[in-house]
Image: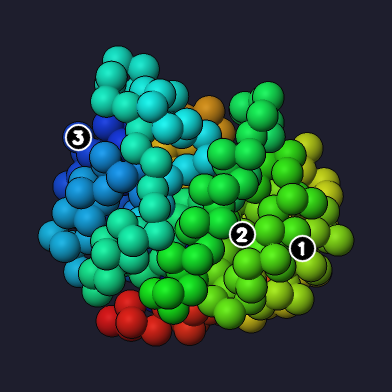
Amino acid sequence: MTLLVDSHCHLNFPDLAVRMPEILANMADAGVGHAMCISVTLEKFPEVLALAEQHANLYATVGVHPDYEAGAPDPDNPADEVPTAEPDVETLVRLGRHAKVLAVGETGLDYYRLSGDLEWQRDRFRTHIRAAKQLKKPLVIHTRAAADDTLRLLREEGAEEVGGIFHCFTESWDVARQGLDMGFHLSFSGIVTFKSAVVLKEVAAKAPLDRILVETDAPYLAPVPYRGKTNEPAFVKYVAAEIAELRGLSPDAVADATTANFFRLFPSAQP
């Protein structure tokens, strides 16, 4: 059976962390051989790294999500009153040297959930790009309602030196083309299975097969037929199946391609 890779999930989040043995068993049953656990704050990075250290088929990233403003509590867990720390290049480089840390991020810009003066987001994004270049490790990019600035900062900071992933890609073909031209990969989530995602389906059908990945963004964005439920890495097979149908390929062909793409982008993760 061809193994899939979930290129973006949050297994340290409470809904999944309490079910870890079940989550891993479900992955194995679904043919999902590997998953990359994504950091969203420095405070929770040790949890992400611990998962990667404890399980050979899990990997980590290091970064601070653009929705997490420094000094504010976790927006996804308001009861957790630990404020978010602002990262600097030195800290990201130090943490990112760990062999199981494959990438820098999740980083980028989000003008949808936050408003006002967001220069701090742009400064933070530059910090992550500079750290990735020092580490010579790829970036994991989050962009929402901010494509123009995201692409501009990537160019200004020379991010094509390291490349990476536009995770949970939901933008137009024009944005996709510009990201691809800079050497980035596009990762598709459960959103591509939604009937309303017409433009995204077109991008998934058109993007070069050797530059696409699949992900869950678990515990969020569960694909059809689990839409509205808690997502988990096992469900990435439905994302791959949708892309296969859009492209007129077999699910195994998409699994082969996206898995090969992941390990080519992250050669140190080769099993």
Q: Position of residue 11 (x, y in %)?
A: 31, 45
Q: Which residue is mark 3?
A: 18
98 sits left or right of 128 in the view: left
Report helix, strand or loop for mark 3. loop
Q: Residue at x 63, y 39 (%)?
A: 119
Q: Which residue is mark 2?
A: 166
Report helix, strand or loop for mark 2. strand
Q: Residues within 10 Å of mark 1 (few under 14, many from 20)?
A: many
Q: Which residue is mark 1?
A: 176
Position of the C terminus by quadrant: bottom left
* Amino acid type at image mark 1: Ala
Q: Residue at x 68, y 24 (%)?
A: 116
Query: Mark 1 or 3, which is nearer the eye?
Result: 1
How far apart marks 3 and 2 lie (CA) works out to 29 Å
Q: Residue at x 50, y 66 (%)?
A: 130
In the picture shown, does residue 37 fall above or below 154? above
**Of pointers 3 and 2, the one earlier in the residue sequence:** 3
Position of the N terminus by quadrant: bottom left
| Quarter of the rendering containing residue 159 | bottom right
Q: Residue at x 71, y 67 (%)?
A: 155
* Amino acid type at image mark 3: Val
Q: Nearer the viewer, residue 177 or 135?
A: 135
Cβ atoms at labels 3 and 2 below 8 Å apart: no
Report helix, strand or loop for mark 1. helix
In the picture shown, does residue 270 fall above or below 59? below
